[in-house]
Image (cartoon, rainbow, N blue to C red):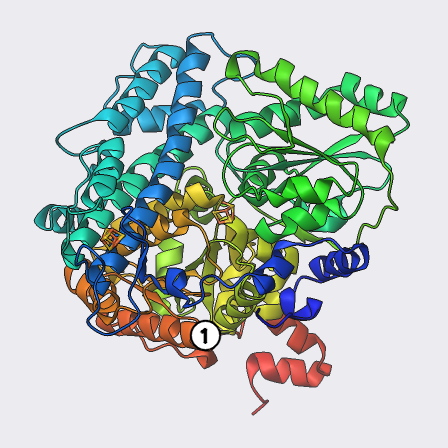
Amino acid sequence: MAKSRTNQERSVDPAAVFMLERADALGISTSFTRAEAMVACPIGAGQSGICCKNCFMGPCRITKDGQTGVCGATLETITARNMARACAAGASAHSDHGRDLAMTLLATVEGKTQGYTIRDVARLWNLAHKYGVTTEGRSKEEVAKDVALKGLAMFGQQTGETLYIQHAPEKRQKLWRQYGVVPRGIDREVVEVMHRTHVGNDQEAEHILLGAVRCALADGWGGSMLATDFTDILFGTPSPMVTQANLGVLKQDWVNILVHGHEPTLSEMIVAAVQDPAMQEYARSKGAAGVQLAGLCCTSNETLMRQGIPSAGNFLSQELAMMTGAVDSMVVDIQCIMQAVVEVASHFHTKIITTSPKAKISGATHIEFDEHRALDIAREIVRTSIDNFVNRRTEINIPNLCEDMVPGFSHEYIDYMLGGTFRASFRPLNDAIMAGRIRGVVANVGCNNARVTHDASHKWLVEQLLKNDVLIVETGCGALSSGKCGHMQAEAAFNLAGPGLREVCEAVGIPPVLHAGSCVDNTRILTVLTQMVATGGLGDDISDIPAVGLAPEWMSEKAISIGMYCMASGAYVIFGATSPIESSDVVQQLMSQGWEEKFGGKMEFVTEDEEILRRALEHIDKKRAALKLPEYDPNRFGKSGDWRMEELLTKSVEDRIGALYGAPA
Ligand code: SF4
Ligand code: MSK
């Protein structure tokens, strides 16, 4: 049994530590304690990729040099197959989410849903042009129907190239064609990876991994990109707004409903139901001050950035939130919902309500969601939650801890923010990188992982990168970590950023860490990078940009798919926490140098935060040098903006005049 950690070693989030103390006092197990009690495998095989269960002659665990599985499969074949299968599972989760959104748009324009509408017509028109759908003289419903059908057709497409591929930089498209990794259809690539990794099939590590890359591209430049596009059309393209993050957003006297999972189709309707004055009145009739909503995980990212609904936390906050005793229901749909929430809820009065036809949990209340009666079902869920308020039976213990955050930096908003309505442009961003005010860009994304200290790597890396003038874009649970830390406030630039980055943030009025959405929205980052290439000055491909992707606390299979599609798009991607390829030097080499030679991007697993930082900065500087940009020098900047004003205001009048105009002759 692994050593048990102190609560401060389990999380750097003070609200989480507060709740972990309560869990200890109540004797309730959590993912934190289970991670200590659970040894992944007596020989650590599952973790480092050397265990194969692909047929029932196994499991085969490769523990000695030269050993093979019963079928003769080598260490590198097994490791590569495991990576490919994880990628296929991740790609299927994201893409199936995208399919559901396309089905909802189609049903909406056919008048078969309740409560949905096309909220962002400009986004629809933009996508119609991308898809080659005629808009002239047509109603938005006619256009949306064709767009939805084209989107859905991409899933079952058997040959040719999926449509989004044409929107990558041209050089990238050529590379993908050269290496035969252009996806033909979304479902086809997922199925093919499952087929190729079946016993007795593809048994060359490099070839298996190329199959995985093709599948990942079907996700990143397919299912996930489509999910983001269709979500924006139905629910609006995000733009910044102020909200809060952490368990302190729960309110003692209110009915608290937590929405958790991923698909906004459910959460948007719950938002609408909660805002209904009749529902607030109903809550008051039960003795509550009202009913309010907060989010968890990526559902939280969706409702934060479109509706300003506060976030109760990220992946590892889900069990802890219920220990406040103030959560009347947790409404879940798909992905990243721990089965343990039902057990934890049983110690309190919390009702766990599952809603997806794809995901039930034993012991939970199932109220199945159906777009045709979406608002009625959302109202039923909210009413059920309010009815549960009177059943509160434990002391309420809400930590008084939350931070303001500003989410909602979609690609479209960044474009507008940098140039205004008539001159929307990425030029100022590219210029700031070219001048060295911004050293480079890091996308810090991904999950929490109970085997490492909650939020510690996200927090430390973000703070170090900011100090080094690196602009950060975030999605998923990494974004929620920064929200909880206060890194997504404009003031964070003043307190944490290096001099050049601080000047840019002050001039534009943005936080130094930009919230770009949920884990399915990593494609927004691909779109930003593509536009940076098109804007000019930073090379002619994504791989030329001084940018790095990090997933320091990853745990899900979706993260593997994201990492692979970002790598194939030209990015250097570093995963922390744990390495599933640790045992195979061959696979490590293939995914690092091997992929860099082919795609200009690479994917590495590095478990030390200091080393992640070192490699990220080294890569950024290498890319700057290749572009012949000035070497990063923080001393060149910081002589303007609010920081400079404060410095001047602390001096005497004579000193201030001297500092501004030089000493008198
Ligand atoms: Fe063992 Fe081969 Fe079966 Fe894998 S596929 S479990 S290595 S026999
Ligand atoms: S919810 S996939 S823990 S980011 Fe998207 Fe968070 Fe990772 Fe789930």
Residue at x-position 53% and y-position 42%: 298
Q: Residues within 10 Å of mark 1 (few under 14, many from 20)?
A: few
Query: Does residue 311 appear to the left or right of 583 in the view shown?
Result: right
User: Number of labelled discs?
Assistant: 1
Q: Quadrant of the C terminus?
A: bottom right
The answer to whether residue 624 shows anywhere in this view is: yes
Q: What's the residue at 46%, 57% (across, down)?
A: 554
Going 35% across and 37% down the picture, which residue do you hit? Answer: 92
Q: Amino acid at mark 1?
A: Glu
Residue 310 in sight in this render:
no
Residue that sits furthest to the left in the current view? 178
Q: Horizontal and vertical percent for residue 480?
A: 58, 52
Q: Can you identify the residue that label 1 sits on?
A: 608
Element type at marker 1? Answer: loop
Looking at the picture, tell me which residue is in the foreground, 43 or 203: 43
Query: Which residue appears farthest toward the bottom when viewing the image?
Result: 665
Q: Position of residue 388 (x, y in %)?
A: 80, 28
Q: Quadrant of residue 450?
A: bottom right
In the rendered image, the vertical position of residue 336 relative to residue 15, given as above or below: above
Residue 205, percent from left and from top: 18, 58
- For image coordinates 34% across by 28% down, the residue present is 126
